[in-house]
Amino acid sequence: MAVPRAPLLIFGTVALDTILTATDRRDRILGGSGVHAGLAAALYGPVRLVSAIGEDFPEASLGCLRRAGIDLAGVVRRAGRRSMSWTGRYSADLSSRETLEVDLDIFQGLSLSVPEAWRDAPSVFLANGDPRDQLRILESVRGVRCAVADTMNHWLREARVPLERLARRITGLILNDEEAIEWTGLPSVPAAARKLLALGPKFVIVKRGEHGSLIACSEGLAPVPAYPVEGVRDPTGAGDTFAGALLACLGSSANPSLAELRRAALTGSVAASFCVEAFGTERLQGLTRASCDARRKSLVEFSALDPRS
């Protein structure tokens, strides 16, 4: 009998996104880093989400998260505040995007905390955000064994010192290739990943979009392929989806092996491939573990990987 996995604690945003592409548009749909990561992770085990929403956030969207198995006891509804919203427009080939508007009213005077009953979480995902807030949340959790943080280039420029302080405290760091290169000043992604390991994390995973990801740990480097999606409609949240599924599969190992990281990253790649097939979280809502497992099997087979991966 399989041992039930302890809940994964996720600290991330819950948002209402407006997404424009060359051929379509969606207004104020369910999104946010915590939502994408949570929906993906919930396919593999229980999830607890720490976040905040405004008084305008639709109850139907919260119902979607609850039905997926996400515990929302850590999500605070703030009276008199608007929920986070993001409006972005993608290029015709979806390779780049422009942020048109961001409403951060929800964060004014906000200091979120982890519910006391959740502070024994062995596994924590700190989705992209201010590293000072990420560190504060991490320090409030007792006995955490595996803590992984995502970040972005904005924090490299605006909060480099606290970001490097956070890097010394976490098990794993996730970021994309441009961020890894900017952080280290090295033109090579593999070299940048190795340099980031020296900051303190046990592993670094560099996301490379349709080219997959690169894992770096003490055992060495390993590339992980992306699942080839023929009909990409919206890449929003794919990185968070990748991270959520990866962390859910990795569990609470304090020092995962390269083989464990590779297996988890393959699962993350598959979850992300579903995410980009529709707008926002539309494809993740109602997605089943069986569908993910079937696609993962195909990814392993046509990548000529060891079936035991």
Image (tube, rainbow, N blue to C red):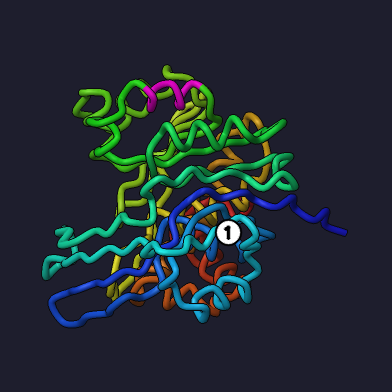
Name the quadrant of the N terminus. Answer: bottom right
- Disc 1 on helix, strand or loop? helix
Residue placed farthest to the right in the image? 1
Q: Position of residue 71 (x, y in %)?
A: 65, 62
Q: Which residue is drawn at 67% across and 33% down?
A: 145
Q: Residue at x 39, y 22 (%)?
A: 164
Q: Residue at x 43, y 55 (%)?
A: 13
The answer to whether residue 186 is above or below residue 282 is: above
The answer to whether residue 97 shows anywhere in this view is no
* Residue nearest the viewer, comparing 101 with 256: 101
Give the amino acid at mark 1.
Ala
Q: Where is residue 35 in the image (x, y as percent from the top left)?
A: 48, 62
Q: Mark 1 points at which residue?
A: 41
Residue 268 in the magenta stretch? The answer is no
Q: Where is residue 224 in the image (x, y as percent from the top left)?
A: 43, 47
Tally the numbered discs: 1
Tell me the crowding category of disc 1: few under 14, some 14 to 19, or many 20 or more residues within 10 angstroms, Cα based.
many
The answer to whether residue 155 is above or below residue 237 is: above
Q: Where is residue 191 in the image (x, y as percent from the top left)?
A: 30, 25
Query: Looking at the rendering, which quadrant does residue 83 occupy?
Result: bottom left
Residue placed farthest to the front in the image? 80
Would residue 221 be found to the left or right of residue 140 on screen?
left
Q: Residue at x 41, y 64 (%)?
A: 80
- Which stretch appears magenta? 162-168
